[in-house]
Image (tube, coloured by chain):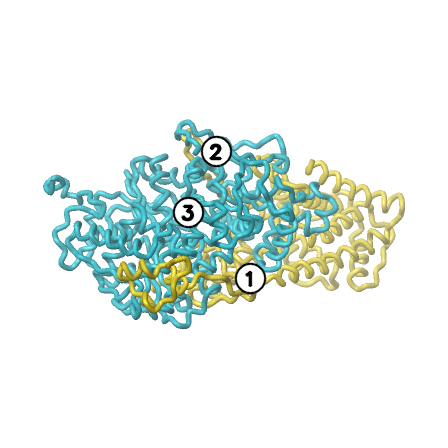
Chain colours: A yellow, B cyan
Amino acid sequence: MGIKLSLAAVLGLVLAAYIGVTAAGLYHFFGVSLPYLAISLFLGGVVYRVLKWARAPVPFRIPTTAGQEKSMPWVKHSRFDNPSTKGETVVRMLLEVFLFRSLFRNTKFEIEKGPRIFYQWEKWLWLAGLAFHYCFLVILIRHLRFFTEPVPFFVQGIEKLDGFFQVGLPGIYVTDGIFMLAVTYLIIRRLIIPQVRYISLPQDYFPLFLLFAIGTTGILTRYVIKVDLIKVKTLAMGLISFHPVVPAGIGAIFFIHLALVSTLFAYFPFSKLMHAGGIFLSPTRNLPNDSRMRRHINPWNYPVKVHTYAQYEDHFREKMVEAGLPVEKELEQAPPVAGKP
Amino acid sequence: MAKVPKPSELKLEHKFPETGWMDTPAVFSPGNFSYPGKAKNLKVLGLANPREWSPTDDDWKLPSDWKKILLEGLRERLDKYRSLKVFMDICVRCGACADKCHFYLGSGDPKNMPVLRAELLRSVYRKEFSLAGKLMGKMVGARDLTEDVVKEWFMYFFQCTECRRCSLFCPYGIDTAEFTIIGRELLNLIGCNIDWVVGPAANCYQTGNHLGIQPHAFKDMLEFFVDEIEAVNGIRIEPSFNRKGAEVLFVTPSGDVFADPGTYTLMGYLMLFHEIGLDYTWSTYASEGGNFGFFTSHEMMKRLNSKMYAEAKRLGVKYIIGGECGHMWRVVNQYMDTVNGPADFLEVPVSPITGTRFDNAASTKMIHIVEFTADLIRNGKLKLDASRNDNHIVTYHDSCNTARGMGFLDEPRYVLNSVCNNFHEMPPNTIREQTFCCGSGSGLNNDEFMEMRMRGGLPRANAVRHVHDKFGVNTLSCICAIDRAVLPTLMNYWVPDVSVYGLHELVGNAMVMEGETERTTDLRGEPLPGMEDNENEDI
């Protein structure tokens, strides 16, 4: 149900944009209003979500320690898997954010009669995840060409690197291909790995189909149903300078692409895509394992009902004295225990 | 009590039902759940809704406003724990955690995949706390909180040992233990708990330890071990109790006082402290290192843990040494100072024998006996004869809590390698931070849960069997009282030739003590290597 629903939603978006511009002529809506709405929702939503998370306190220091703690000087400390200082924790976070350190540990289980369990090498999810995110980043940076004049050097540099394997015109970008492969892999694994399929919700399929459609329409505009890039840039520059104009004669495929991208941005803060921000606030990763060295303060720590030593001794005094255990109050000076003569 | 099927009869398939998980109800059957908390224990602790009931009943006798209580409880905790709030929102269901859980590997029940365990709570959160969930319901993975959902929570939050192995593999560090801990906390608000947790917690609260050992009995039991040691090596040890002015307070799980093989580990502690002449005391009031309160709620954890600092203050000691225990050390390392500190009446621990200052415990002022011993060995302060353990081909089980809640990995290995000559590691993805749970942690080490325990312990046992077959390993060492209580049963079930030893039992075997008589047996009274012929001489 989730698969069909998500697929239908994405196809519906494509169709709506196509009909919207070709039949209804809603160029301004799809070229200006929708992108503005989307970016507002994106920025506002992300800020709202992060603030909402950050408002909740971190009562306890609960890092998942993934290596040897800082101990005596002669014990080799695993600094970045079990950081004990802020600096080391920053490195741990960088490894997590840029290299997906935790996911790199992934394995896959196999079970044989006996039962015997084996753990297989499984880095495909890590690889596809990393490839997807980095390609997405490069593609995003390449798109800055449309929003800048002159185009900054790093955008040109990245384009050059990305188009390294130039075959014919226009140059093929490596990242386009890897992006599509990675997204396809992520869709297929969700469909065929039984564990993952069983846990998948519509909101897991929808972003993948959406990204697939964004990639496809993007590639179409560049290589197949080419659109006038000068006009696209005019539109983009208009948007970014808050003097939006929609030049006539940009093909419908561009508006479909733009509508899908707008949907992604608008959808982002209200979905699991916020994992991008959440990782930074994850208490099992962003705290040093130093709570024996430095006291961590819980802002809502409150007094609780405890069973005091005095109550304990009152309860057991006779037995303690008899067993020769030291007591605070000797038997004769202690008040009579309730319920005893 | 349910009969546990033999290993060869145990059915294990990782299949998925035709129905989606929301439409597949939890079915309580003998061996897959723990008995509910007894009313008398709930009353001792002042917990909600004490009553007699059973998970197999249709009517769980919940309070009439149970739903309101749970939702208010959830709202409150979302505002108090960033972990919970962030983890509710950021899971992408990538499935990396799915096959990392020992209960999933051993049971094949999809709801034991960490991601689904969390979704049990997340689905209700979506329904009640998100607009999309309110509007679109099941379409976006949201569902109403019903009594069936409560039953499902009870089933699966008490089929999780809070071992945090999943959190190691999660790309965002989502920790299912947070869902389990807080899920159990919520269930406690309406009186749904298991007796194997609230029973020990009630005992600990009133009597000072989980097993309800009263002060005079505690002293008696330790004196029994003193006799045992004397029988082994002729040395008479005189431990002190509740003694003011001692330099160190020693606290260890009461399981070590009560049952084999933990008792041998405790004999190891007694011998070590005697040998180095440590000025220390036991306490009958703070006679529990473990903390079953932690398996009830954060508040109960604080209530039970408070005794350690309170007693250290009353006795006027300088610092605390803690015995071998898993969850005790997660609490000491990650919670104690925060909930019951600051321990400004104590001093930064300094070993009186080596002069080593334990700056890694500068704030809690509590050190692990294994780091204390490792430091003694490093400085050559112990005379050790590792050959006394030559009949042991040893492997080492990292406890989940000391591994992933502390990173206490190489200290025990250093001690182990100093006291025995034959040590073999289990495969890399089953040890250290990737260690597998014993299958019985977090208060699930009860008899009625045995089938699930044997299932959950399978990945651990599987790795032990590997080194048993490959290197002839016959000894599984550990630094956790629950491990010592449950691994013998697990080994007996899956790898019958392997015995379980606490680390300080092996230390006690190897330690050559000042003035000892010639030793012919280990602490269990079994002949030392090369002494097998003397075995019957005494008789």
Label 3 marks a residue whose chain is B
Distance Cα–Cα, label 2 vs label 1: 39 Å
Q: Position of residue A39 (x, y in %)?
A: 75, 57
Q: Can see residue B317?
A: yes
Question: In this rendering, is residue B313 above or below A341?
Answer: below
Judged from this view, the residue extending furthest toward the left is B537
| In-image side of A124 versus A322 (left or right) | right
Distance Cα–Cα, label 2 vs label 3: 28 Å
Q: How many marks?
A: 3
Q: Which residue is mark 2?
A: B30
> Do the dots labelled 1 and 3 sit on one chain?
no
Which residue is found at the position 38% from the left and 47% from the top? B482
Label 2 marks a residue whose chain is B
Label 1 marks a residue whose chain is A
Question: In this rendering, is residue A160 above or below B488?
Answer: below
Q: Quadrant of residue B238?
A: bottom left
Between A274 and B373, the one nearer to me in the picture: B373
Between B499 and A310, the one nearer to me in the picture: A310
SS at badge 1: loop
Q: Can see residue B407?
A: no
Q: Position of residue B302 (x, y in %)?
A: 47, 60
| In-image side of A169 versus A200 (left or right) | right
Q: Amino acid at mark 1?
A: Val
Quadrant in which the N terminus of chain B appears: top left
Q: Residues within 10 Å of mark 2 (few under 14, many from 20)?
A: some
Q: Which residue is mark 1?
A: A58
Q: Which residue is mark 3?
A: B435
SS at badge 2: loop
Q: Amino acid at mark 3?
A: Thr
> Do the dots labelled 2 and 3 sit on one chain?
yes
